[in-house]
Amino acid sequence: MKFDEGCNGLREPVRPDCETSSHEVDGQGSIFRREWRPVAAGTGSGPEGSRLTVDIRRPWGNGAENGCFGERSNVQSTDNTSPFTIIMSKVTVIGATGNVGMFATYAISSNPHVREILLYGREGRETLLRGIAQDLIDSFAARGTDIKVTWTTNLKDAAGSDVVVISAGIPRSSGQDRLDLARENAKVLTPLAQTIGVIAPETKILVVTNPVDVMTCVVLKHSGLKPNQVFGLGTHLDSMRLKSLIAAYFKVHVSEVHTRIIGEHGDSMVPLWSATTIGGIKISNLPAFAHLPVKEIIKSVKCSGNNIIKDKGSTVYGPGEAIASLVKTVLGDENRILTVSAYIKSEIHGIGEGDVCIGVPALINRNGVFPVSIKIDESEVIAFRESVEKIRAITAKVLAHNEE
């Protein structure tokens, strides 16, 4: 009989199939049971009862009881529904030596779908990359997270990535024109996009580099990937900032507020008051809305990033968590509607039809990002059209300059 060595060093028989370990959760803890059987069958009464069965399938010898993990796990509640699969994924962070890249990496590491994180930085940053990787590994050991962390200055190592986060680029300096910044960062992102498109044609690219709407279009064009595969952070964080301010004003839990900002991640952003609700009630139907300091709130959202930079040097935690939430939405196949920078056609009142990526509500899952058709108030339509034309003009100039 053939034998193989397990995680604990013991030699065990090689099985023709994979091992399934079932963990029965009884409200007190988990009871480990190992047996050979198909993916979990219903064995209890579900979350309201006392039992939930979690089956983890992996090659023989890699038992969860020994602290090892496999490529995927199959989880099923005990109400006889079909099992769903958690696919373990690889995420690459480009610009991992920057403040946002570093914290985003740490935030992404809490995602149960992530198996491996690759840190990419330019040549000459090897020592810093090595230090960041080791620091993360130490934090994972303290947390009890088993994720592989590697680093590289060769982008070809990103092959096989399920998601690539691009936070590389030159930060905007005081008084610098946005068009000049866009031209400089387009030079940085263009070769990166070209390489990613070749080595990871099935990946999803999340662009963070500013001006993010323009950079998202640059990456889309030069990667050669489909529009649903490339998206930007856009107004996702802006929407969260607005949500927080509204919750504070009405003195409600932030989860009770649903709102979003579309358009440019910048001065021409458009808050959708027509789509804002508190506790499921349209905000305009609340008497207190008449006293809401709308202009002050929007000014606060627009200035939030600059104020943080002025006070502490850079924005880190907000963007990092926003990035991680988008990565989780993709890898978890969550089908959430979030506001990100995406390539639009005519989803919002026929506005679009051109080389422009901008903040819009989009359905996000493992297949990518898909803008959602919506109807908004006329004043919002006018403001959104102006925002789109502004970004379209800048994008055209940057793409033309990039080809010279």
Image (cartoon, rainbow, N blue to C red):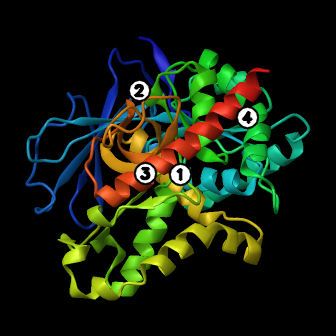
x and y percentages locating residue 363 in the rendered image: 33, 41
Residue 357 drawn at (x, y percent): 51, 38
Could you tell me the amino acid type at mark 1? Answer: Glu
Q: Which mark is residue 384?
A: 3
Give the labeled residue for mark 1. 264
Q: Quadrant of residue 169?
A: top right
- For label 2, the SS is loop
Mark toward the start of the polypeptide (3 vs 1): 1
Disc 2 designates what residue? 60
Q: Which labelled disc corresponds to residue 56?
A: none
Task: Identify which residue is drawn at 24% across, 29% down.
Answer: 36
Q: Position of residue 279 (x, y in %)?
A: 21, 74
Q: CA distance from mark 2 to mark 3?
A: 56 Å
Residue 200 visible in the picture? yes
Label 4 amino acid? Ala
Q: Find the distance from the CA under tag 3 to the CA under tag 4.
A: 24 Å
What residue does disc 4 label?
186
